[in-house]
Image (tube, helix red, strand yellow):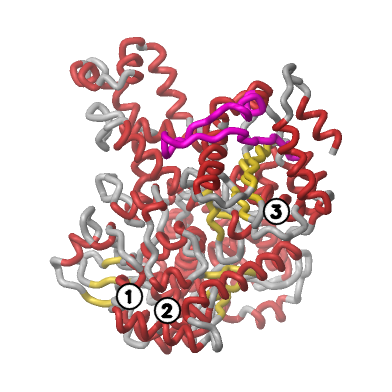
Amino acid sequence: MKIKEGQIFNLMDTNGRRNDVVNALQGYLSILDDIQNKRKMHWDSMPESLAQYEFYRQAVELSPDVFGKHEPYDKLLKELKKDNAFRTAVENEDMAWIQSHRISHNVLISQFDLGIEDRARHYTSNLVKLGFTDEDRKISPVGQLLLCLKKLKKDELENMLPIDGVNVVYLRQLLKLRLYDNKGERFYSPFHLAIYALLKRQRLSYNEFSELVQGLSPYSDFCHIDEYVAGYREGDIVSGNKIEIPSDLKTSSKLSETCFRERFKNRKSSAAVEIYWNYYSLLWEFSVSQDSDSLNQLLTCYEKHKTMLNKAFGCGQNIFSQKTGERPSKEAFLKKYQKIFTSDLNEYLYLQFHLSKKLDQIREYSDTTKRIFKATGIISFSNGFVELAYRELCTCIFEEHVIKSHIAGSVSKEEHPSYESYDRYYCSVTSLSSILNYDKPETQQVKNHIQLSFPGVRIEEIPGVVKDRRRQEFAEFLEAAYPMDKVKEILGLFENRSNDKQIKETVSPDATVPTIYEYMVGIAWYYFSGKRIDLLASYNLTLSANFEPLVHAGGGQGDIVIYEDQKVVMLEATLMNAGSQKRGEWEPVLRHSINLKIDEETAATGREVTSFFIADQFDYNTINIWKAVAAVPLQSSTDKSKFTDNVVIMPVSTKELSFLMDRSSDYDEIISNVHDLFEEDRKDFDLHWRDKFMAAI
């Protein structure tokens, strides 16, 4: 990725930024996979291809809560309804007809690129930035790996870390990520800087961390990066900035409104500039008159628009620190803020405006950077601080001198153009050891260092020890963050989708509500089991280092699969309403249940397999068919020669799951009773079988 001098980099395009960034990228990649590999469309705009239109259509359908407003798309659909022939061609993907009628339908075709195809390009540009596709939106080898994590092969060092496949893919890509200058001759690696800073400092405030990582660029001087990182304090990134003052501001007179508006712009809001002008006028008036009345007007204006003015002129901090309504004497005020009133006001305000703008951009873009960094699973963001997770491992794997050597450097003119190409390094599947240039002896040396951090433990036992510690930390996290009463309260919110915002704010803004539902269902089941299950290993979710849900990892298996000595329990959780369940859940839930049971029988584990379908409401045809097919031989979807019967899929509502949390002492008995229920041989099918059973327990 190339950036201009002075530009603040971002890892997700502004027009496609959203909180659930990992989920968004996964969804966008899946849509591209459908368009390219299943529908065989080439990435282009109308009238050459329907690919970009189709991408946007599917993105809206995939995330209706995110894309709640789409006026250009709605307008286009209305226009298509008026033209039956063109609409039919679009629906049938008849590009030959569209091409032959392109002139007569030129106006209609042009509408495809007004808020639809252009947005599709914006959204997918984020996949390009992370190497999941090339510039032509062809899914790269690493993008294909993210779509099919079963093909992921971890190296020796990756196996040491207690992170999942999605975490590993993001860790690799961020370690390979480079930002280049315009000439493609110098690069900067923000993730290497992030790791280096956390190795040097152990713990940083979030603002210090984001300014360090987001504020540097290929144009920065890295000669003394160790001293710079070691001594960095919040705000340092702008303290040394040299800003050229325009000649029309170099005056001791008050600026004209025209001049002011030209120099103090806000592209997002013209109303904001009006407030800036009013604030400047009152500031100027007080600097001249220095009387109590003008001071009162100035502070009244500031208090009314405090957040906006702090953001525009205070580098995010309070410009004036007195309490609202408090009015200091003019003498005390002038003394406290003499830096403002003894400076050339025009130049001072211009400097503050531009420094504030840079800091604001850093903090705005760093929000997305943080969310993508979270996906690696090795950086902890908690309570306003940032740390490396699994420090004993990370300090050995990411040797300080190695990481420092990867932060920045120069490259040949021939290297950059091919760096991000489809078949070159950035888009390739490359393991952690290879990225860090560790050969076999160096990898062994790293492992030896790791073993020194775990005295008395054999090297092959260390991953297990780390996972055990992680499980204990997770148990402590659940006790603190999600006690039983809070879990029940959150589960109750899913009944009404108008609570989605509250759910995300309570649990994790980085995940979708369906992902959060799976996460909370797992926690509820953890309490139902008497806290005995290994929930962390059972989730098919990708979590952050702070145990926050990020994205469902997929992979063709159940949402939560719990393995114990005598039994295997699979949980399938959905927020689909009853009307959508047959279409969206009937087949995958049955398929996952069949395959899991056949896998257990093939391995001759002797474990009893039970599936539970968790939802707020049920489609009665679906759940009754599941009950009816329990005695029917069913075929594996992965090995057609294998069959099983007595596949148990028990529906449990969210409300019922809340009640079950209080029945932990009966956990084994209830699951056993579920099997007894399905094994009953009845001639007359009882439509109320499920309700009667749940009422009984």
Contact? badges 1 and 2 (CB < 8 Å): yes
Contact? badges 3 and 1 (CB < 8 Å): no
Mark toward the start of the polypeptide (3 vs 1)? 1
- In the figure, residue 617 lies in which quadrant? top right
Label 1, residues with CA under 10 Å away: few <14, some 14-19, many ≥20:
some
Q: Number of marks in the image?
A: 3
Q: Which residue is mark 1?
A: 436
Is residue 364 in view from this perspective? no
Secondary structure found at label 3: helix
Contact? badges 3 and 2 (CB < 8 Å): no
State whether residue 24 is above or below residue 577.
below
Label 2, residues with CA under 10 Å away: few <14, some 14-19, many ≥20:
many
State whether residue 169 is above or below residue 655.
below
- In the figure, residue 217 lies in which quadrant? bottom left
Label number found at residue 84: none
Q: Nearer the viewer, mark 3 or mark 1?
A: 3
Secondary structure found at label 1: loop
Q: Which residue is mark 3?
A: 523
* Residue at mark 3 to residue at mark 1: CA–CA distance: 37 Å
Q: Position of residue 561 (x, y in %)?
A: 59, 50
Q: Residue at x 57, y 32 (%)?
A: 585
Look at the image and give the residue range highlighted in magenta: 625-654
Quadrant the N terminus occupies: bottom left
Quadrant the C terminus occupies: top right
Label number found at residue 397: 2
